[in-house]
Image (spheres, rainbow, N blue to C red):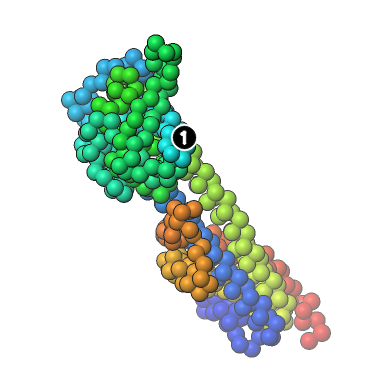
Amino acid sequence: MASYARHIGLRYGFSPQRSRFASFVSFASLVGMMLGVASLITVLSVMNGFAGELRDRILALVPHLYIERSATRAADAPVVDADPDYLGVPGVVAAAPFARETVLLAGPYGQQGAVMIGMDPAAQGRVTELGQFLQRGRLEQLNEPFTVFVGSALGRSLGVAPGDELRVVLPRISTTPLGIFPRSRLLTIVGSFEVGAQQDGQLAYVSLDTAERLFGGRGVAGIQLRTSDLLTAEAVAQRLRPLLRDGEELRPWTQTQGSLFRAIRMEKLTVSCLLLGVVLVAAFSVVSTLVMAVTEKRRDIAVLRTMGASPGEIAQIFLTQGFGLSLIGVFLGAALGVALAVNIADLVTAIEGWFGQQLFDPQVYFISRLPARLAWADVAFVCSAASILSLLAAAYPAWRASRVAPAEVLRYE
């Protein structure tokens, strides 16, 4: 007898003897909850996929930590592997020297600004994943003097390819008998890379020896560090700061690229709040379902009260009815959302085949398939939020049912 209230609530909610209109409203509430939960899970998975693509592509060429030197310190250029201070810090797994300068590149199709990075071809693979995104050439070819690797988009915009020569103009001047001219030099392109992100149109790589000759003997501008985990870069940076020398500055990747990923997280939060509105509307449809049920069952409520049912037990009956209906919608929505999130890429590909059009042109979006990464934490959050909203929505009609006065209802019976 202790569970009779839940038993009656389930019978009220799923009885086939209700009116057609009440059954339709209940079914609409269930479908609304299911679609709201499924859409929220799917959209969050797609946003996780885009964020993952950006992280994998953009951060593929970005070290986890930079230690940059001032111009006076750059002339020292110590050998990184002989300096155990940084490599001995817990969390630091690799280090490599680098030099960097903003230059102007000129090709047959025009001129474009770029960032030229001098690096050690043998050590660069330990701190970034540049070697995995090479289209043509090998990094060892940069050991030849005055050779360069360019991004694929940069090469297309300048009209150059591996084997061609490229003129680099540096922000320095050379004094000659004919006057003062900016320093420039022809470089031979020996390879190209493509990560499918903005770096393809902004970066060019040369060896440290070539960089020292081009940049006027400035030497190593700093050290690139790789940590054991990308997400722990900030914690490792805190351990490294006491070891910095005069003229050195530590910059984790969250400072150079963090604004982009903070914007993605803010966008995900905003979209989550907006789509929770869909779940909220479905939850409020439960209110209408229960209000109709209370109106239909006023006589039954009065009879139960006269038989000894307490107001709390009456409220529990309608809470069980509304919450049980919502839980079915949440469960079906979670199953549908997970299925869509896992198969959304294949579904979009099938739609492209049906209509004969490509939704994601890789030349424009750098991707050819809709990315999606299912996070079970998001699924748990969506299901919990939908369940709490449903419970809150069912509370008021249940309270109203508990306030029904048996004497007023049964006065003329």
Q: Residue at x 59, y 59 (%)?
A: 275
Circle 1: element type: strand
**Farthest residue, direction front:** 178
Q: Residue at x 61, y 78 (%)?
A: 27
**With respect to residue 229, does 176 lie above or below?**
above
The x, y position of residue 200, in whole percent, is: 40, 43
The x, y position of residue 349, in whole percent, is: 45, 68
Which image quarter holds the C terminus?
bottom right
**Residue where numbered disc 1 is placed:** 111
**Farthest residue, direction right:** 412
Q: Residue at x 44, y 61 (%)?
A: 369
Left or right, 88 with reference to 189 = left
Left or right, 57 with reference to 325 = left
How many other residues sit within 10 Å of disc 1, few (<14), some (14-19) or many (≥20)?
some
The x, y position of residue 381, in whole percent, is: 49, 57
Residue 406 shows up from this direction? yes
**With respect to residue 101, does 51 lie above or below?**
below
Residue 382 shows up from this direction? no
Nearest the viewer among 303 and 122 is 122
Q: Amino acid at mark 1?
A: Gln
Nearest the viewer among 169 and 310 is 169
